[in-house]
Amino acid sequence: MNIKGKAWNYGDNINTDFMLPGKYLELTDPKELAKHAMEGIDPTFAKKLENGDIIVGGKNMGLGSSREHAPLALKYSGVGAVVAESFARIFYRNAFNVGLAAIECPGISRKAKTGDDIEIDTTAGILTVNGEKLKIKPLPEFMVQLLNEGGLVPYLRIHMREW
Amino acid sequence: MSLTVSQKIIAEHSGLKSVEPGDIIKAKIDIAMAPDLTAVLAYNAMVEMGVKQVWDKSKVVFLNDHIAPATNVQNATLHKQCREIAKVEGFTFFYDINVGVCHQVLPERGHVWPGMILVGADSHTCTHGAFGAFATGVGSTDMGAVLATGKLWFKVPETIRVEVNGVLPEWVAPKDVVLKTAGELGADGATYMAIEFGGETIRSMSIAGRMTLCNMAVEMGGKTGIVEPDRVTDAFLKDRVRNKYKIIKSDSSAEYVKKLEIDASALVPQIACPHAVDNVKPVTEVAGTKVDQVFIGSCTNGRLEDLEAAAKILRGKRISRDVRLMVTPSSFEVYDAANAKGIIKTLMDAGGVVCNPSCGACFGGNNGVIAPGEVSLSTSNRNFRGRQGSTEGFVYLCSPATTAASALSGVISDPREVK
């Protein structure tokens, strides 16, 4: 899978309250959630973002609440992938479950500035930023399949019997 | 082979003799819990998966608790949808706005026991490790898969052992133990791991205190917190759990990825400063900081002994006129018991506002949000920027005793110094 977009670097410890503040948890329509993506740390993000752009973070990306509203808001606002040094557990699972790629890439938070072009080749395990190639952590086969099939809902629609 | 309690529970639920950290397994789920804000998403995910009914209507628990009662049409609609799903599906258990906060209600109503696997569509589901259960928070789609099948995949976690020995000094509480732990391990120090709390301090600690410890495992990135079950556990569950359960403990030679030792007798009141849960200091280092709102409640610290600790400090006194004291008991059972003991009256007489059980104040939902520039001193579990209202506010986390002492003086205060 190939993902290309401009970087938005927000640094370490980007929590799910930043991605989608608690006051919007009552929303269930992903398109409505998308309007508030990253509002807790960058209120104009949803307006500035272009389709396919990539959120870059440092360590412990997505810490905090189990709210799936967070990766949903990112996905439906047009975010192509989230790349970080490391991820918190629940956000990581949730991202794949909604079909949003969460990529661990050591060094990314120092190499990619906001506005830089990023290209990710998940098959080759390479991320290119400003012409420099960085290794990404290989994804377990099951996670790759989840992404390819669009998340856990479409996956289970096909594979319910094997579950 | 030597195993931790978490490994044993996971192995048993996945039909395996033994599991190693890092193994990916599929486990059977004993109880699946979802609160108002995530339940409808989870149920919709199940329906979209092509499944018409939950796998077992006696094993699914929905609650309306996060914003309760409803504060606007949108969350009123969510509540209504939860009620309708529970009715149409014929759930054996559904708890509406008059029961309490999910992590308090589940054990009170007998849905938690040692050796079980419990998943909840709320990150603080790790609280239930206090009963020797393997309990973890999941997102809505994972919960949808559980509702559909009763199973979920897990990566078997490594375990960090936190060994606490010694007697806690007066006015030093389980919250101070877990804040100390968070300061030592860091906000990502236990990512994907189980945190097992043990030692003589834990063995003599109440269920309420153990719940406070396990509750905050996720704040260190943990998959679950866990305490090996014992007589304290049995005594709490005796009249609540109807099914039989097995007491499962770690082998004495079980392997831990890390061990942390805490001397309880040397511990002083701790506080997590803005805007990170691991920005932990002794209270004395920030004493004197002006406070606007004090919040006693949440799934971390809204139990009877928490309210009692606050009442002990506030009895016969009046809080500072520059402070708002917000109290939300964790459940109606707690509320009722606190009322019977005169604790509610004490807190009200001191100038406190006692709200109905709900999660609202912890995450900026309802029951007391803060304005720009305001400082909140809170017994809850997260102090992210913007967590309790304004992104220009400041949230500190501490014990009920520290909040009560600070409500009196209007500035952050050490509870050991209240006269």
Image (spheres, grey):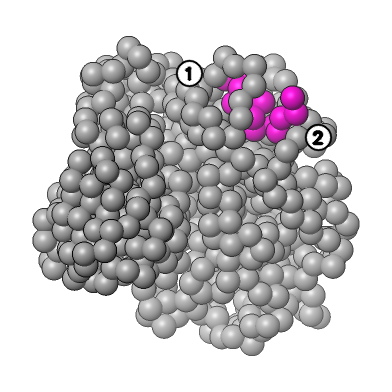
Where are the magenta residues, as a range? B1-13
Give the image quarter of residue B56.
Answer: top left
Q: Pinpoint the chain carrying mark 1.
A: B
Q: Pinpoint the chain carrying mark 2.
A: B
Residue that badge 2 annotates: B253
Tell me where residue A154 appears, x and y as whole percent.
22, 27
Whether residue B272 can be seen here: yes
Give the image quarter of residue B21.
Answer: top right
Please state which of residues B310 and B270 is positioned toward the viewer in this rendering. Answer: B270
Give the image quarter of residue A98.
Answer: top left
- In the depicted structure, whether residue B4 falls above or below residue A2: above
The secondary element bearing badge 2 is classed as: loop
Q: Is residue B259 left or right of residue B179?
A: right
Badge 2 and badge 1 both on one subunit: yes
The alpha-carbon separation of the residues under discs 2 and 1 comes to 37 Å
Type of secondary structure dominating the magenta stretch: helix
- In the depicted structure, whether residue A119 falls above or below residue B319: above
Residue that badge 1 annotates: B58
Q: Is residue B44 magenta?
A: no
- Amino acid on which the number 2 mark rests in the picture: Ser
- Amino acid on which the number 1 mark rests in the picture: Ser
Which is in the foreground here, disc 2 or disc 1? 2
Q: Quadrant of the N terminus of chain B?
A: top right
Residue neighbourhood size for the residue with mark 1, other residues' Cα within 10 Å, grouped as few (<14), some (14–19), many (≥20): some
Q: Is residue B153 left or right of residue B273?
A: left
Tell me where residue B333 appears, x and y as whole percent.
61, 42
Residue sitting at x 53%, y 50%: B191
Residue sitting at x 70%, y 20%: B245
Tell me where residue B306 appears, x and y as whole percent.
68, 57
Residue sitting at x 28%, y 50%: A126
